[in-house]
Every structure is written in structure tokens, then in C-alpha cells.
Image (spheres, helix red, strand yellow):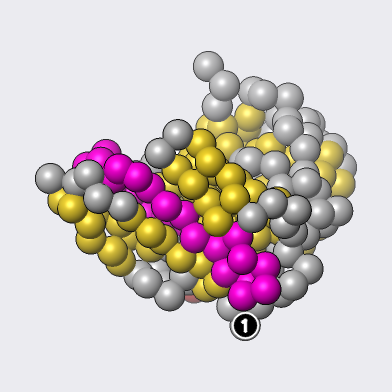
Amino acid sequence: EAQVTQNPRYLITVTGKKLTVTCSQNMNHEYMSWYRQDPGLGLRQIYYSMNVEVTDKGDVPEGYKVSRKEKRNFPLILESPSPNQTSLYFCASSLQAGLGDEQFFGPGTRLTVL
Amino acid sequence: DQQVKQNSPSLSVQEGRISILNCDYTNSMFDYFLWYKKYPAEGPTFLISISSIKDKNEDGRFTVFLNKSAKHLSLHIVPSQPGDSAVYFCAASISGTYKYIFGTGTRLKVLA
């Protein structure tokens, strides 16, 4: 089944404790991206990757890191989480990007930073 | 600065009637627009898109209209069904870039 998977689905952590949210897609998509969803703010793009080893900042990259060492995986790293990073996170992928391609989203990861 | 705006946080419509969801944008460089639907506890799913060379795109019960001069797009759902109850996001991008700007979403409730 074609899908984007994220792990964990739920995470409660404390300020400053490094964490990684994994994202994997099995559709051989070139493009992957991370978003956060917050009430009243919609979805905001954190980072995206056009291809392996190529990443760039979205609108809200502060406090996050990403890497794209393999085509299928795009982990989101919070080196020192803070309470303002409490949010619902979505990973997405598309066959390519730059021409408004539809994105396939994962089920989301709800993160709480205490 | 919100480049893509959905000014109606919520909308209620009777089953069988038309649902119209609106989206305004400020950046005239946007040339691709997409609508996504999101159910609780799930990720958004793609619904329909339109490029700026068109002013209308249809897919079954869903039609998107683009008014470039007004920097406005709308999603029409006809007829509305209870299963359409969800949050709808519009998104915009500029060809050749890799960024997507989403609106804040409109929660649609279709009443049986």
C-alpha cells in the first residue's frame, strides 16, 4: 500500500531532550516536506527536500533540523525542544515539486513539550 | 504576513445543498493552487488543484474556480454530503519553487 508513515504518533517529552520524528515513504517520491499544524495558523512548512542530500528551509525552520540521506526517509530532529514546539506535525511527499504536485501526507505526530 | 487566507473558520450546510469554501491570496506570483481535506486524527488528503492558466477545474462533485484579478479561489461541493464534513485547506505555490503556503483552514459541517 502506497503510504507515508510517521513515528511516533504521539510523544510527550521535556524541554531540552533531543528527539527525532521519523518519516518514510514507499512511493519513490523525490520531494518530501515537514509541516506543523497549530490552531488558527493552519499548516506551516518547516523544511523540505527536493531530492537526496538536498534540503531547504520552509517558513518556520527555527529549532528544527532535517536530513535526507536516503530517498525514502526524511527525519525531523529537534535538538533542544521547547514548549513552543508543542504541535501536530505532518510529513508529506510528492513525486516531484515545482509544478504544484499533490502531496501525500502521513497520519501526523502529536508532540507535547513540557 | 498571511499570504493565503481562509477568512471563514467554519461553515454549515444542509445535505444536498452547495458548499462554497473561499480562499484569498496576496502574492500574484502564485500559479498553482491546491485544496486538501482533513479528517480528525488523519493527515490531509489532496482533493483538487488548479493552475493559473485555467479559471476552473472540475472533478466529480468538486469544482475549483480561480479569479486571478481578485486573487481569489473557491471550492464548490455539489451536492454536499455528510461525509464531506472535514477541515478544508487551500494551498498555493510558485512554479519552480518548492515551498507551499497553506491557509488556516475552514471547518465544513454538512448537516443530514
Residue B7 picture location, percent across and down: 43, 75
Residue B101 included in the magenta stretch of the image: no
Label 1 SS: loop
Q: Residue at x 35, y 45 (%)?
A: B78
Residue A85 seen: no
As drawn, is A70 to the left or to the right of A62? right
Q: Residue at x 84, y 37 (%)?
A: A52
- For this rendering, which residue is in front, A46 or A97? A97
Residue B15 seen: yes
In the image, the segment drawn in magenta is B66-89
**In the image as oriented, which residue stretches furthest toward the top?**
A1
- For this rendering, which residue is in front, B3 or A48? B3
Q: Amino acid at mark 1?
A: Asp
The 10 Å Cα crowd at callout 1, few under 14, some 14 to 19, many 20 or more, is few
As drawn, is B79 to the left or to the right of A85? left
Q: Which residue is mark 1?
A: B1
Residue B42 picture location, percent across and down: 39, 42
Residue B82 included in the magenta stretch of the image: yes
Q: Residue at x 63, y 72 (%)?
A: B71
Q: Residue at x 43, y 47 (%)?
A: B37
